[in-house]
Amino acid sequence: MENTLSFSPKTKKQYKWLLTRYPTRKAALLPTLRLAEEEFGVLGIPEMRFVADLMEIPPAFVFGVVTFYTHYRRAGTGTYHIQVCSTLSCALRGSEEVVQRITERIGIKPGETSECGHFSLSKVECLGSCDTAPMLQCNDDYHEDLSLEDVDQLIEQLRAEAAQEGN
Amino acid sequence: MAFKKIFTEHIDKKNCHTLAFYKKQGGYKQAAKALKKWKPDDLIEEVKASNLRGRGGAGFPTGVKWGFVPKQTDKPKYLVVNADESEPGTFKDRVIMEKCPHLLLEGIVICCKAVGIETAYIYIRGEFVFATQRLQQAVDEAYKAGILGDDSLGSGLKIDVTVHRGAGAYICGEETGMLTSLEGDRGQPKLKPPFPAVEGVFGCPTVVNNVETLANLPYILEIGAKEYTKIGPENSPGPKLFCVSGHVENPGTFELPMGVSLRTLIDKHAGGVWKGRKLKAVIPGGSSAHVLTADECDVAMDIESLAAAGTMLGSAGVIVMDDTTCMVDALLNVMRFYHHESCGQCTPCREGTGWLEKIVHRIAHGEGRRDDLDLIVDVCDRMVGKTICALADAAAFPAESIVKKFKDDFVAAIENGGSPAWKKRHSSTVGGAASHA
Ligand SMILES: Cc1cc2nc3c(=O)[nH]c(=O)nc-3n(C[C@H](O)[C@H](O)[C@H](O)COP(=O)(O)O)c2cc1C
Ligand code: SF4
Ligand code: FES
C-alpha cells in the first residue's frame, strides 16, 4: 500500500528538532506521534504506518505503543472528544450525573460517537484536577466545577461551533 | 522562623509564571550559587542534611538517592522529572508547573550540578496540555536567558531540559515504567534492581525525582539545611502541598508545613465536610493509601506519623468522604481504576485487580456472597509484595483496609441486595434524575 501522507515543512522541522533531543531515535516516537496527531487529526492505521516508515520502526511496534496509551486521538473519534473523569473524587461529587446528562443531550453512551461525527464520549480516569470535580476534558481543554447547566451550555456551544465549521 | 509559602505565595499574581516575575522574587540566585560556588559533593551532603524526602509517593530521602549515582562513569547521566501526576486525588505538581514553572527549573539546575548531569527530561502526563505549554514557555525563556544551554548561567556547565509529553497511562508515573515510556516503548515497569540511579534511561545512571521534590531545592539552599529541618518534623520536614478533594466545602491545594494535623487540614483549610454532614472516611495519600475512619483523623500529615497510623503520606492527596458515602461503591470505583491501569505483566496484579473489581462489583450489585469479604482479603494477600512494581500493593491497600474498617457497609450490601445507590438506580424509572445532592 502506497502511503500518501506527509508532514508539512513546519512539522518536518519540528520532527528534525525532536531527533536532536534524544540519544536514540525511538525515544522520539511518542512526541512524533503527537506531531502526526496534530498534522493529520487522528492516529489511524495509515498515520501509524507513516510514522513507522518515517522513523524506520516496525509498524507493529508503533501500533503496540499507540494502543498501550489512552490519550492519542484514534481514528473514528468525533470532532469533540468529551472525556469525563470518573475516578473517586469526581464520582463523589457527581461525575455519573454529568455522564448521564451528556448521554441525554447528545444521545450517545460512553464509548460511542454521535452519527453526525461531532461528538465522542468517554469515561476516563483521574485527570489531576480533583479539587474542581466534577470535571471533564474536551479535546485539549479542561472544564471544571461542572453543574448540569454548565454541561448543557458546553454542549450548546460545541454544537454552535460545529455548525459554523460545517458551513 | 515564620512559615513561608514557597510554592503558592504568588500564585494569584498576574504573570507569576514568567521569568521576569520569578527573577524579581530572587529567582535563580540559588542556582547561580550552586553552579559557581557549591561543590557537587557538598550539595549532595546539604540535601541529605535537609532530610528532604521525595514528594512523589515513596518518600525516599532525596540526597541519599543522588548519592547512589556512580561518580566515576563514562556514561552520560540523566535526570528525569516525574510530572506524570496521575495518582487519584493528587493535583499539586500541576500547580507548580502552571504557576511557578521556573521554581522547578531552578531545582533541576541545582540537581544537575549536584549529580553531574547535562540532560534532563520532564515527563509530563499527556492530559496536562496547559501545564505543558507553561513549562515549554518557561524552558524557552530559560534558554534565551542563558540559564539553560551550553553555558548554564555562565558557569561553563551544560544543562539541557526537554519537556516530554506522555500519552495517558497511570503506570508511567511508576519510575521504571516512566523510563521505559521515555525510551519510546509501552510504559511497562521493570524489575529493580538495577535501580535507575545505576542503570536507568538509555541504560545510563538516572535520577528520578518528583516535581515538588525538586522545587524544594532552591529554598533549601536559601535558608540552609539546618533551618529547613525545623519546618515540621525533623525527619520529614519542609513546606508541603496538600491536596484535598471529595466531600469538603472548599477543595483545593493547601501549602502548609509538613506535619499539619489531618483534622485541621480538613476542617479549617478545606472548610470542613460539605453540607453540614459528618465525616465518614478519609484516604490521606492518594487512592493507593490505606483508608482512615473519622475517628482516626487526629494524625499529623507527615511520613512517619501516617506510617505509624497504618497508612501513608503517599502523594498527599486527601480524599474526604461524608457519612452518606457507601464504601462499597467507593471501593468499586477505586478497584476499577487499578484494574484498568494494571499493565498486565505480572499475574498477581493482572488477575488480582480483575478479581477485586469483580468481587466488589458483585457485592455492589446485589450478587455478593457471605464469604466474599474473606476472599477479598485473600486476593490482597496474594498480591502484596509479589509483583514487579507497587501497583499491585496500591490496589490491595485500599481494598483490605476499606473492607476491614467498613465491614458493615459490605455486609449490608450482601444481605440487602446491593449498595443503596445501586438499588436506587435499579428501581428508578428510565430517565430518573439520580441525584448526588
Ligand atoms: C503505580 C505507581 C504510580 C506512581 N505514580 C507517580 C506519579 O504520578 N508521580 C510521581 O511523582 N511519582 C509516582 N510514583 C512514584 C515513583 O515511582 C517514584 O518513586 C518517584 O517519582 C520518585 O521521586 P521522589 O523521590 O522525588 O518522590 C508512582 C509509583 C507507583 C508504584
Ligand atoms: S505490578 Fe501490575 S502494573 Fe506493576 S508491572 Fe506488574 S502488572 Fe504491571
Ligand atoms: S478524580 Fe477526577 S480529576 Fe481526579
Image (spheres, coloured by chain):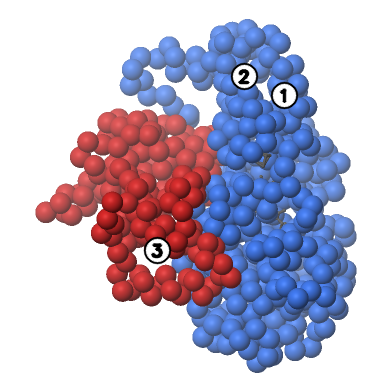
The percent coordinates of residue B368 (x first, y second) are: 61, 12
- The chain that hosts pointer 1 is B
Give the chain coloured red. Answer: A
Give the chain coloured blue. Answer: B
For the residues labelled 2 and 1, say whether their Cβ atoms are less than 8 Å apart.
Answer: yes
Q: Residue at x 48, y 71 (%)?
A: A18
**Image vertical order of residue B339 relative to residue B270, above or below:** above
Does mark 3 fall on the same chain as mark 2? no
SS of the residue at dot 1? helix
Marker disc for residue B379:
1
Q: Residue at x 68, y 69 (%)?
A: B78
Q: Is mark 1 within 8 Å of ligand 2?
A: no
- The chain that hosts pointer 2 is B
Callout 1 amino acid = Val
N-terminal-most mark, 2 or 1 = 2
The percent coordinates of residue B247 (x first, y second) are: 58, 37
**Image vertical order of residue B304 relative to residue A34, above or below:** above
SS of the residue at dot 3? helix
Callout 2 amino acid = Ile
Q: Residues within 10 Å of mark 1 (few under 14, many from 20)?
A: many
The residue under label 3 is A54
Q: How far, Cα to Cα, is label 2 from label 1?
A: 10 Å
Marker disc for residue B359:
2
Does mark 1 fall on the same chain as mark 2? yes
